[in-house]
Image (cartoon, grey):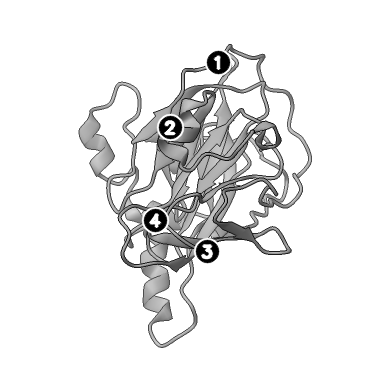
Amino acid sequence: MAAASDPVELGAPWGPARPEPPPTRFHPVHGANIRVDPSGTRATRVESFAHGVCFSREPLAPGQVFLVEIEEKELGWCGHLRLGLTALDPSSLAAVPEFSLPDLVSLGHTWVFAITRHHNRVPREGRPEAEALAPSCPPALLVEPHLCIEQFRIPRDRLVGRSRPGLYSHLLDQLYELNMLPPTARRSRLGVLFCPRPDGTADMHIVINGEDMGPSARGLPAAQPLYAVVDVFASTKSVRLVQVEYGSFFPQCRPCRLCAA
């Protein structure tokens, strides 16, 4: 389930499409137990299970996916990665909270989703909650080359986890492509993005191995800078950033089978 602070004042509708954004990096401001590598693309919690909150170095562009891959796990802890967005500038924080949930959220203007081994899908407006227990589209459609989320069309290839080369890697890759492995497993890829709406607000979406989990939070301020939040929490020990290549940046999503459901 997502936890969110109250929506802030509504902003203006979003502007026209922009050039492809720069590569994503982690912000130099982060939790006390986090170490970020010199490239700014890998974050590792070096002790305990907490103080693992990280941020994107720059605010995200509309439709831009902040995508991480789980690199290392640590046994003995209960809980998993947490993802979200914040309108707080990380540089303005007096101290990075110990937890994203509830500490960072309690500061306001922050929306965080706790990833679990199961049931990360969110029912759409006007649909029964039972819908969230089933895949949002038939498994065959998960191999479509693009993922359509509201008005955005995103190449799927980088969104899907990949196994390490080995004897059974081809079988594992098929499971990742069909999103049949636990989202908390090593090599799973998880992303967060926001999609502006005509009323000046935005929806936050979580993507797990190439599948959209639905709008996990609504009413975000689309006109304000929104930074990604990654909490390297408990059993998740290390994550690395994966760059998404958009090509022609964020083309409008034409009607397709993935969007029609």
* Neighbour tally class for label 3: few under 14, some 14-19, many 20 plus, Cα within 10 Å: some
Label number found at residue 234: 4
Q: Which x, y percent locates residue 248?
A: 73, 46
Which of pointers 1 and 2 lies earlier in the amino acid sequence?
A: 1
Which residue type does callout 4 highlight?
A: Ala
* Neighbour tally class for label 4: few under 14, some 14-19, many 20 plus, Cα within 10 Å: many
Label number found at residue 46: 3
Query: Closer to the camera: disc 4 or disc 2?
Result: 4
Residue 240 position by quadrant:
bottom right
Q: Residue furthest left?
A: 130
Which of pointers 1 and 4 lies earlier in the amino acid sequence?
A: 1
Residue 188 position by quadrant:
bottom left
Alpha carbon distance from label 1 to label 4: 30 Å
Which residue type does callout 2 highlight?
A: Pro
Is any atom of residue 155 visible in this view?
no
Alpha carbon distance from label 1 to label 2: 17 Å
Alpha carbon distance from label 2 to label 3: 32 Å
Alpha carbon distance from label 3 to label 4: 11 Å
Q: Which residue is mark 1?
A: 8
* Neighbour tally class for label 2: few under 14, some 14-19, many 20 plus, Cα within 10 Å: many
Which residue type does callout 3 highlight?
A: Val
Which residue type does callout 1 highlight?
A: Val
The answer to whether marks 1 and 2 mark residues whose Cβ atoms lie closer than 8 Å is: no
Q: Which x, y percent locates residue 216?
A: 41, 33
Query: Closer to the camera: disc 1 or disc 2?
Result: 1
Image check: 166 left or right of 254?
left
Q: Secondary structure at mark 2?
A: strand
Residue found 38% across the figure and 63% down from its top: 185
Q: Secondary structure at mark 1?
A: loop
**For residue 34, above or below residue 12:** below
Which of pointers 3 and 4 lies earlier in the amino acid sequence?
A: 3
